[in-house]
Amino acid sequence: MTSRAKSRRTAAAWGAAAVCVLALAGCSQKAAAEGAARTGTEAKAGDRPTPTASRTHSAPKPLPELAGARLNIAEGQTVGVGMPISVTFSHPVPVARRGVVERRLRVSTDVEGSWSWVRDRNLLDGQRVDFRPHTYWKPGTKVTVGVGSSLTRHFTVGRSLVATVDVRTHVMKVVENGSTRTVPITAGAPGMDTWNGTMVVSDKAPKVFMNSRSVGYGDAYAGYYYYAVHLTASGTYLHQNPKADTYAGRQNVTHGCVGLADDGTAKRFYDQVIPGDVVTVVGSKDTVAPGNGYGDWNVDWDDWRAGSALR
């Protein structure tokens, strides 16, 4: 759904009746308690009773495309303001069937948003569709998501945290609920530039084994890096890097990740962020693709809406 009117209708449908099919882009059943059987007209005195057929409203037939569908947000999770809702499928959904699938998807909240089919870096075309609002989620927003009639999740948008990494000044500005602090960083060296554009934290781990062969840099490095905040599917992290002790705030020397010093700086940022928080890199070169992690915010709103099969 792409308008506030549709969002309000969606929210009303969720509260109307349990017989309404859970879906993220519209309810195909009447959202009313008509599931009980009805009898025929009242019999007149002396008339012989005649049987009448009851009427029930059955749920729509399950779509085969939704079998095995997965959601990127866990039940009850609290996420950052940039987190898109991402549904992935076990097999590609043909173009002709994408509108049918979208109609079985629902986001229940009062927000202007839209679905858009995204070519995931690690999947085939037609295996991923994402929902995002026109602008970042409002902190405190509660959202219910349904995929068909069998998969439902509820999540909450937490406080706002947006970090902006300027590779030219070697500084990251972190804005949390209006409070700002600056952090020295080192980014990708020339020829190994950090992705430009907006990325969304997908997950984080206290340590991650990183091997330069996986990103085409030969034997440059292989080992554990600590306080790793995951930004792209291609392997971009914001993490502790011993080189940052010398070069943070001065020079870009990494293989594409954003490095923070091991004097407590990296751990502090790691402890601060949650999945869905926003990290925007400015002053670099190539912009991260929408399907390389959650690069959805790099698509302007009109183009994002045009990626829906229901436009």
Image (cartoon, grey):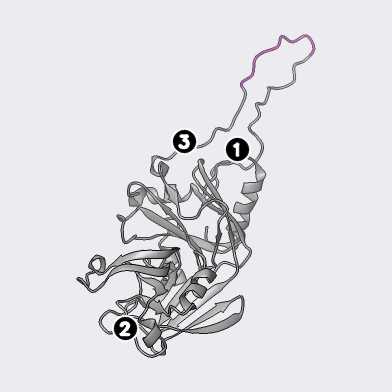
In percent of width and height, residue 113 lies at 53, 63
In percent of width and height, residue 7 lies at 59, 57
Task: Classify 10 Å Cα crowding around label 1: few (below 14), some (14-19), many (20 and above).
Answer: some
Residue 182 or residue 161, whichever sits in front: 182
Quadrant in the rendering for residue 216: bottom left
The residue lying furthest to the front in this view is: 263
- The residue stretch that appears in magenta: 45-53
Task: Classify 10 Å Cα crowding around label 3: few (below 14), some (14-19), many (20 and above).
Answer: few
Q: Residue at x 71, y 9 (%)?
A: 48
Q: Residue at x 58, y 33 (%)?
A: 57
Residue 287 or residue 245, whichever sits in front: 245
Q: CA distance from mark 1 to mark 3?
A: 13 Å
**Residue holding disc 1:** 19
**Mark closer to the chain start, 1 or 3:** 1
Residue 135 shows in the view: no
Q: CA distance from mark 1 to mark 2?
A: 58 Å
Q: Amino acid at mark 3?
A: Lys
Residue 263 shows in the view: yes
Quadrant of the image containing the C terminus = bottom left
Q: Amino acid at mark 1?
A: Val
**Residue holding disc 2:** 253
**Mark closer to the chain start, 3 or 2:** 3
Q: Amino acid at mark 2?
A: Val
**Residue holding disc 3:** 61
